[in-house]
Image (cartoon, rainbow, N blue to C red):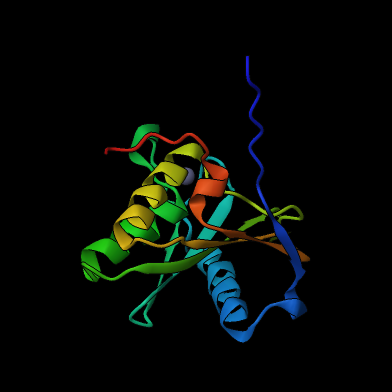
């Protein structure tokens, strides 16, 4: 028997420690939370995705009475970006959440389905997509979605 241990490196930043590009992306993700449609969960999530052509695409979660029809902020942004700018590579994505009148204290991370969706675009782009997971006072910076989805399902 052999034991293997998988590690995930997370860099923890205060907002002021971020570079200007990251600050902009974080702010756009935070602003995008106001565009969520969440009458059921009341959990507003926003995502801002930077593309290698300089464009920033935002998304917000959209719920539906038929629950499976809704979608997360991350996939809203990723799928829109892929449809609007085919061939553009994704550089980084910031994710923020707002609930009960404030941004959530702990950084939010993408759900498993979104991790899988982001992974496919990471593979297509041929380079890691950096993640900026926003809490109220700290931002987790993670290099590449694979760090959050070890042993992922991939088409080879
Ligand atoms: Zn999701």
Q: Is residue 15 left or right of residue 77?
A: right
* Residue closest to the eye, 132 or 77: 132
Q: Quadrant of the N terminus?
A: top right
Instruction: Judge whether 155 appears above or below 22 on screen.
Output: above
At horizontal 46% and vertical 60% (from top left) the residue drawn is: 128
Residue 77: percent from left, percent from top: 38, 61
Instruction: Judge whether 6 appears above or below 26 on screen.
Output: above
Q: Is residue 61 left or right of residue 99?
A: left
Q: Is residue 50 left or right of residue 15?
A: left
Residue 62: percent from left, percent from top: 41, 50
At horizontal 59% and vertical 76% (from top left) the residue drawn is: 22
Instruction: Judge whether 145 appears above or below 66 on screen.
Output: below
Q: Quadrant of the C terminus?
A: top left
At horizontal 51% and vertical 67% (from top left) the residue drawn is: 32
Location of residue 87 by image quarter? bottom left
Residue 48: percent from left, percent from top: 48, 68
Residue 43: percent from left, percent from top: 59, 48
At horizontal 29% and vertical 57% (from top left) the residue drawn is: 124
């Amino acid at each position: 028997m052999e034991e293997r241990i998988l590690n995930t490196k997370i860099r923890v930043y205060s907002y002021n420690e971020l570079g200007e590009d990251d600050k902009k992306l974080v702010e756009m993700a935070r602003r995008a939370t106001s565009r969520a449609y969440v009458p059921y969960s009341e959990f507003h999530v926003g995502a801002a995705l930077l593309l290698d052509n300089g464009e920033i695409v935002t998304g917000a979660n959209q719920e539906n009475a038929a629950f499976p029809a809704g979608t997360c902020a991350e996939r809203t942004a990723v799928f829109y970006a892929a449809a609007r700018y085919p061939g553009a590579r994704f550089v980084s994505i910031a994710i923020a959440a707002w609930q009960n009148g404030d941004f959530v204290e702990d950084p939010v991370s993408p759900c498993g389905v979104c991790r899988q969706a982001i992974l496919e675009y990471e593979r297509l782009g041929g380079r890691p997509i950096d993640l900026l997971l926003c809490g109220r006072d700290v931002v987790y910076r993670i290099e590449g979605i694979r760090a959050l989805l070890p042993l992922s399902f991939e088409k080879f």
